[in-house]
Image (tube, coloured by chain):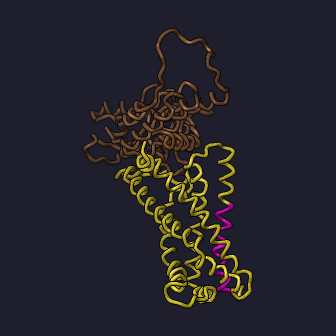
Chain colours: A yellow, B brown
Amino acid sequence: MTWKQMFTSSVGKKLIMGFTGLFLILFLIVHVSLNAFIWANDGGVMFNQGAHFMGSTVVPRILEIGLFLGIILHIVQGYMLESQNRKARGKVKYAVSYGNKGSKWYSRSMALLGTIILLFLIVHISHFWLPNRSHQGFLLGEEINLYQTMKEVFSNIWVVLVYVLSCISLGYHLAHGFQSAFRTLGVHNKKYNTMLTSIGYCFSIVISLAFALMPISFYLGWIQ
Amino acid sequence: MEHYNMNLNLKVWRQKNSKTKGEFKMYRVENISSEMSFLEMFDVLNERLIEEGDDPIAFDHDCREGICGMCSMYIDGKPHGPWQGNTTCQLHMRAFKDGDTIVVEPWRANSFPVIKDLVVDRTAFDRIIQAGGYISVNTGNAVDGNALPINKNMADASFAAAMCIGCGACVAACKNSSAMLFLSAKVSHLALLPQGEPERKSRVLDMVAQMDKEGFGSCTNTGACEATCPKEISISYIAKLNNEYLCAGLTTE
């Protein structure tokens, strides 16, 4: 069996979703930990140092390329799978749907939740990553005060609401995705599956809550 | 349990053949005993339709004792009806009460085209089995009993997978029309036994390839299949299948 055959079958495509999904989960841990520097409440000194380190050091910049490739692969493969799965279902729908009797709504809505996260990513990257990276080192000179940018962006209630809603979508996406990724990669021991499901729920609540609290903290003036 | 009779309204999918478009038709059935099976209720209705000169409703059935996997109705939003771990033929009318309206549909999946009314073509499953659901044994004298030691837990796990009757309820329940619960049961049942060892790698790769050829969707681990399976096959067999696939894919040339 060639590599191509292995990763283009229906199971192989899911393996790619699982691998990239877990990789993105690792990224979320790094992202939320670094961003938590805002709660040092030191006017952004520690946070800006962290932001400077991530933007001006070679290893994070190389990892960043991997991150973008991982995100793009996860998105493209995800949409391809969704379209194939819809085709497999056929044109005639059930008059009475099985609904929540057999599965949780968010496990059936991964593509929808993922689309909300994708739309959010476009907004999020244009808020912070683009203006920040474009001023770091090689393009437009002077590095911007990222902490100040956050403060300005999160002074708008609508932006805060969009961020909070996106964090909720992320939470549900992770609630299913975390344990599903391990199953897809072949963890079949029930002892581990039960443990991973619980860790997945805790992880999705902690991550989405921590991210959602960032814009809220700025908007309500908890941090200056 | 007390016996009672009931009158019911049935909303049944009628379709002449795979080429034509189908539609729902309403039927009234009266004096149905609570001790009848769901299929016997259909028999009563069909007798009447034949007497009236109408076309009887086509539906699959064979053993009528829950072990052959032929019956296949999607009843009120769940394959095999409202009871857990149960086939349509073992569903009894005491699951319903007087005046109920019951919606009966065929399995819906591109790979299971409707042949007529509630009968769908499930030969895709046969072709998946043919692709790898076998073991090689030398013919000759019968082997002594217990010549091959097998761990009791492994034998039990293998038997739990072998319970699959290939009815297709997992496909019918899955939002992706994925056949992974069926496939994982068939692959695991042989992979867990020493007799299945010689073809262990080629089996999983060939059967996945055949499943893809038949046009079934991918598994997204929603768990709808496990919830509906009349033989209560565990979804952890799907993870086991993924494991088999990954190991075989990485180690074959």
User: Where A53 falls versus B9 (above or below)?
Assistant: below
Dividing the image into 4 quarters, which one contains the N terminus of chain B? top right
User: Where A127 falls versus B124 (above or below)?
Assistant: below
Residue B43 in view of the camera: no
- Image location of residue B226, percent across then percent down: 55, 43
- Image location of residue A28, percent across then percent down: 61, 67
Instruction: Single out the residue that lies furthest toward the left.
Output: B19
- Left or right of A76? Residue A166 is right
- Left or right of B133? Residue B236 is right
Q: Nearer the viewer, residue A59 or B81?
A: A59
- Image location of residue B50, percent across then percent down: 31, 31
The magenta stretch spans which residues? Answer: A202-221
Dividing the image into 4 quarters, which one contains the C terminus of chain B? top left
Residue name at image x 47 percent, y 16 percent:
B138
- Image location of residue B140, percent across then percent down: 48, 10
The chief SS type of the magenta part is: helix
Q: Nearer the viewer, residue B232 or A42?
A: A42
Residue name at image x 35 percent, y 35 percent:
B58
User: Where B32 falls versus B242 (above or below)?
Assistant: above
User: Where A215 falls versus B145 (above or below)?
Assistant: below
| Count of all numbered marks drawn on residues in the image | 0
- Left or right of B139? Residue A178 is right
Q: Nearer the viewer, residue B43 or B242?
A: B242
Residue A89 in view of the camera: yes
Whether residue A210 is in magenta: the answer is yes
Whether residue B154 is in magenta: the answer is no
Q: Nearer the viewer, residue B154 or B225?
A: B154
